[in-house]
Image (tube, rainbow, N blue to C red):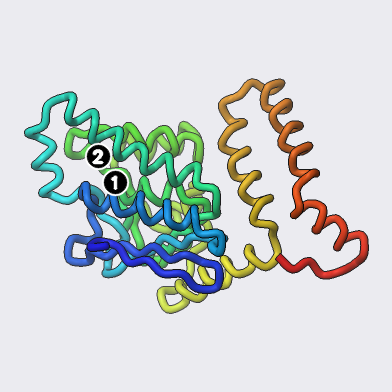
Amino acid sequence: MNFLKYHTAENIAYITLNRPEKRNAFSFELVKELKEAFTTAAEDQTVKIVVLQAEGTAFCAGADLDYLQKLQNLSYEENLEDSVYLKDLYLQLYNFPKIIIAAVQGHALAGGCGLITVCDFVFSVPDAKFGYTEVKIGFVPAIVMTFLLRKIGEAKAKSLLLTGNLVTALVAQQMGLVTEIVAPDQLTDSVRTFASSLIQTNSAEAMRSTKLLINEVQHLMLTEALQQAAIVNAQARGTADCKKGIAAFLNKEKIVW
């Protein structure tokens, strides 16, 4: 891979944006490599958690200048194809069958802020800034809007999307975008410790089913959501993980996942 680094350790896959000279800005090739890396992590049975991180001073600055210039010369059909390609990346992460933790060491802007929006947990350094700046250049943050509304609600989403203003990590945490703020020299260890605790204390299968059910029930009517919840509840009871967990609980034994 030319724009990413990928490695695994202790049941964790680390996907690292590696265009520091471009502030890890999006290009077609970077999006392609992200899709491939997440597909690899999904198919690796030894991987239980994915950490998305970045090299350099910025986490991701959105689309790079060359990419934006190229878009100006595309037809509507070509732009639609490119937009769908990007949409598929965000949807892949949102519906990813394993937990994704973003480790944000610098600013996450526009499409880069979209990336952290579809992660399950976000750890950030205090000085990082977050923002969806598309409206400032006449663009519409259309794709990420769908996910942001689900994550933080209409009022907060409007505040971010319609102003295009940047917010601090603390404000992003108060809005529900950031999970935890940690010192720069503690970011890597904090994320690894959190990921390891999920791996050791929780069933990977149960986390997968819970995450996907959270995604699914939000658009359903109450009765439909409850019916789907009952189905998943019944299915979970028959899994090996559930049987193992209940047996250990009843026997007062430590569960080793």
* Residue that numbered label 2 is attached to: 134
Marker disc for residue 110: 1
Query: Residue drawn at (64%, 44%), measured in percent from left and top?
Result: 209
Q: What amino acid type is highlighted by mark number 2?
A: Glu
User: Pointer 1 and pointer 2: residues touching (CB < 8 Å)?
Assistant: yes
- Amino acid beneath label 1: Ala
* Left or right: 250 as drawn, with respect to 24: right
Q: Nearer the viewer, residue 210 or 155?
A: 210
Mark closer to the chain start, 1 or 2? 1
Q: Is residue 210 visible?
A: yes
186 vs 157, nearest the viewer? 186
The quadrant of the picture occupied by the C terminus is bottom right
Name the side, left or right, on which 115 lies relative to 22: right
| Residue 127 visible to an observer of this rendering | no
- Identify the residue at horizontal 34%, vertical 57% (top origin): 129
Query: Which x, y percent locates residue 84?
Result: 30, 33
